[in-house]
Structures are given as C-alpha cells and as structure tokens.
Image: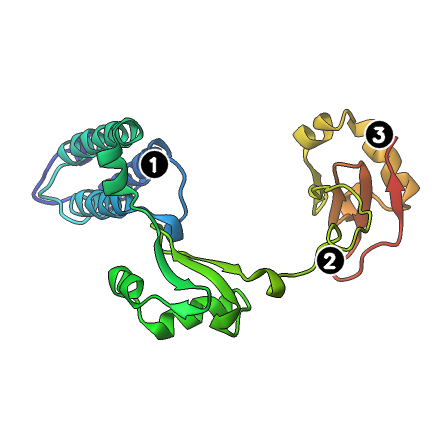
Amino acid sequence: MDFFRSQESLTTLQWILRAIVGYFFLLITAKALGQRSISQLRFLDFVIALILGNIMAHPLSDEHLGLYGSMITTVAIVVLYLLTSWLSLKWNFLKHLFEPSPLTLIEHGQLRLDGLRKAKISVNHLFSELRKQQVEDIEKVALALWEPGGMVSVFLEPQHQTVTAKDMAISSDPFSLVKPLIIQGAYDTKLLAQHGKDLAWLEAQMMAAHVQLEHVMLATIDDQDHFRVYTELDKPDKDELMLH
C-alpha cells in the first residue's frame, strides 16, 4: 500500500495502482452523488464536479502527494453535498439558490431581452436552440424558458401544435414500450422473467422464426407481448409472433 502515501518517486506499477484506485473511487463517488447527465448539471453539481476533479487529479499526477488526504477530502465534500441537497428540499432559500426559477426568453412570439440578459445567452444561441426543436419562427412560440440546467423549453401556440389522434377523434392503440430481448445472440434473463417466460419458450420462438438463437442480431418484445426477430440490423425478419 505504499502507493497511497507520498514518495519521492513511484514505480510504473504504483502509478497504475493509483490510477485504478482513483478510478473506482471516483465511480463510487459519482454513484453517491446521484445520476444526472452533463447537460442537466445544476449550479451546485457543476461546482462539486470541478472541486472533485481538481482534488483527485493532483495525487494521480504528483508522486509527492498521497491518496489518503484527497480521498478523505472527497468523502467530506460528498457528505456536505448530500446534506445541502437534502436541506434544499426543506428550506426554500436554499432551493431557490441552487435551483432558481426558469427565465422567460420568448412570450407569445416576442423576445424577452431581460430574460436573455439574465441567462447570459445571445439571440443567435436562442435561435440555435429553437432549430434543434424544429421551430423556425419565434412567432409560433407561446413560451420559451431557460431552465436552470441550461436547457431551453419551448411551447408552441395551440394553432401551431401537431394534431393528435385525440384531436381527430381517432382511436389508437395503447402505448407499448419496445425493449431489446436478444442482442447479438445474448438474451436478457431478467426481461424474459418479467414477461413470465423461460428459455424453453424463447427457443420455441426461435424455431418458429426458423432462426437459431446465436444468429439473432436483435429480438424485441413490447408491453403487448409482440415478439419480433431481426436476423440483420438493416433487414428485419418478416416473422412477427404474438406471445401467448
């Protein structure tokens, strides 16, 4: 465990061991902090990410620094982060500090320059965000908000919204989520069990589709128990079986 302590020099193996320990320690730390995509980082998340990255980077590149101190400091900061996040749920002051209200950028087709200034974004950036959501004209926008996570939420005026099956009084099938059951010959046992099926049933479906399990590139199952087999990713098999 000498690689944990500060030394005049480290061997190649000790550097590798430091990297391995640091890597898994940061994975555990990230898991403790909770899952949040980079594009959805709050102000507090961004600050914590900078601090933790800086703390762990130094001992992983400087043999004169030990890992113990950095790991203890990281644990202390994670505890403070979790405590602050919990308190922000209880105190409105902290909630508004770390998760401020969204800023209005467009309201009924009119730019809100005060919102743009507070969000510190340009009109060009706003138009770029609108294009990402297939909105080409701000006059179609009923409301556009700059969210605390850095995303732009866009709501169209009713006359520009897409017509739905409900608007047309057309009956539609219930929503059904399609999930991958087999990927490149490997099947998901948990998903199979969720649908009350076993390997024997799956093999029977493969026989009915005239394909061997190891040759299946992709097979999917949905909430309505529709089973589909794809022998090639670009050429779906025409066989579609209804599970019983």
> Of the numbered discs in the image, which one, if any, rests on residue 233?
2
Say whether residue 159 is left or right of residue 124.
right
Tell me the tag on residue 24: 1
Residue type, mark 1 in image: Phe
The numbered dot on residue 11 is: none
Instruction: Please give the residue where the numbered disc 3 appears in the rendered image.
Output: 201
**Is residue 115 shown above or below 203?**
below
Residue 9 appears left or right of 124:
left
* Location of residue 71 in the rendering, given as x and y in whole percent from the top left corner: 20, 33
Separation of disc 1 and disc 3 at Cα? 39 Å
Contact, mark 2 vs mark 1 (Cβ under 8 Å): no
N-terminal-most mark, 2 or 3 = 3
Rendered view: 217 above or below 24:
below
How many other residues sit within 10 Å of disc 2, few (<14), some (14-19) or many (≥20)?
Answer: few
Q: Quadrant of residue 36?
A: top left
Q: Which mark sits nearer the N-terminus, 2 or 1?
A: 1
> Residue 180, how many percent across, how many down?
69, 43
